[in-house]
Amino acid sequence: MADKLLNSREQIKELDKSNVLGSIEQIGSQVQQVWKIAKTLQFDPSYREVTNVVVAGMGGSVLGTHVIQTVFKDELKVPVTIVPDYTLPEFVNEKTLVIASSYSGSTEETLAATQDAINKGAKVTGITSGGKLAELLRSHNLPVLVFEPTFNPSNQPRMGLGYSIFGQIALFAQAGLLQVADTEYNAVLRAIADAHLLSGVDVADDSNPAKILAFEFTTHIPVITAAGHLEGNAHVFANQLNENAKTYSEYRVIPELNHHLMEGLKFPENLDNAIMFFLVESELYLKSNQVRTTLTAEVLEKNKIEHRTMQLKSATKLEQAFEMLVFGAYTSFYLSMLHGIDPAPIPWVDWFKDQLKKRA
């Protein structure tokens, strides 16, 4: 790789004015902080008797829920629904646990949905860095995980995924809906540390898979492809490529894509130069999905579509989720550097929100 920008912290700092890199490097510290706070929360025993869970939140605040839905698919005993809206479904009642998730604590849709949950008599909790959401839940004597975003120097909510993802996992555990032992928590921290050693800034271009992939993405539309427990992570990765690298990307899921997408690889005629599939492989996939991933790569090869693969190495589904989370964060960051842009600002999202307030 000819471009040496990615090896120079000094050059990176000139572009990365909000220190997004610092937020990525402190994902492990985010996890540690939020786990410690969650341990202090007390839930009424009735929270363990709910028949369904609704997570109310917008954007990055519910990415963690998608990760939970897929990583813990075989362990969750009740359905989990994401509601990115002002109101909740009619089925929400006293047997529903509603988790309000807003990094800032000021998201208007989440605040309205939380009040709706209280009005419906649901069991309610939340996760936030403070703001009106913390005030609302505390005013009703409801348990709330409030963290000070000490380890997110960029102050970008999407870069506080250690807080939002593991914070929600901790809430599920404290409410009795998941079993997460301290040994599993410690294993996640080791997986994060190993991922930093693989993809961090101080690892040179030619041996750093995140830098290599970012360089290849500079001329291609990334299609993040995963299966099973990593579907939520594919969603996170694609979103971070959008927001950090300002790059069009999408995510696709095996086996669903095998039923239609493979027939859409012929046109337009320049498609083979435009897109690149990134297939995440795991020995923890169902055997059938491992075979499907291999066959999908063969179909791409036969259609002359660029593709790359990565085999995750961690031992458990939860560890692999954080291994991929760190890798994706670094890749999106490096791609922003190669594009010569500050990854923090999201001008079109900000413009849209401003116009929405004016016109709604």
Image: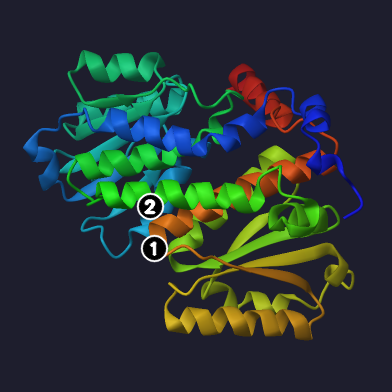
Image side of residue 113 versus residue 190, left or right = left
Relative to 88, is 323 above or below? below
Relative to 61, is 193 above or below? below
Q: Residue furthest left?
A: 45
**Crowd band around label 2 with a 10 angstrom C-alpha radius: few (<14), some (14–19), many (20+):** some
Query: Could you tell me which secondary element the residue under label 2 belongs to?
Result: helix
Amino acid, disc 1: Thr
Q: Which residue: 67% across, 79% down?
A: 297
Q: Of label 1 and label 2, which has the lower sequence position?
A: 2
Q: Which residue is mark 1?
A: 316
Q: Position of residue 147 (x, y in %)?
A: 38, 23
| Quadrant in which the N terminus is drawn | bottom right
**Crowd band around label 1 with a 10 angstrom C-alpha radius: few (<14), some (14–19), many (20+):** some
Q: Which residue: 53% across, 72% down?
A: 254
Q: What is the number of callouts on the image?
A: 2
Query: Could you tell me which secondary element the residue under label 1 belongs to?
Result: loop
Quadrant in which residue 316 is drawn: bottom left
Amino acid, disc 2: Ala
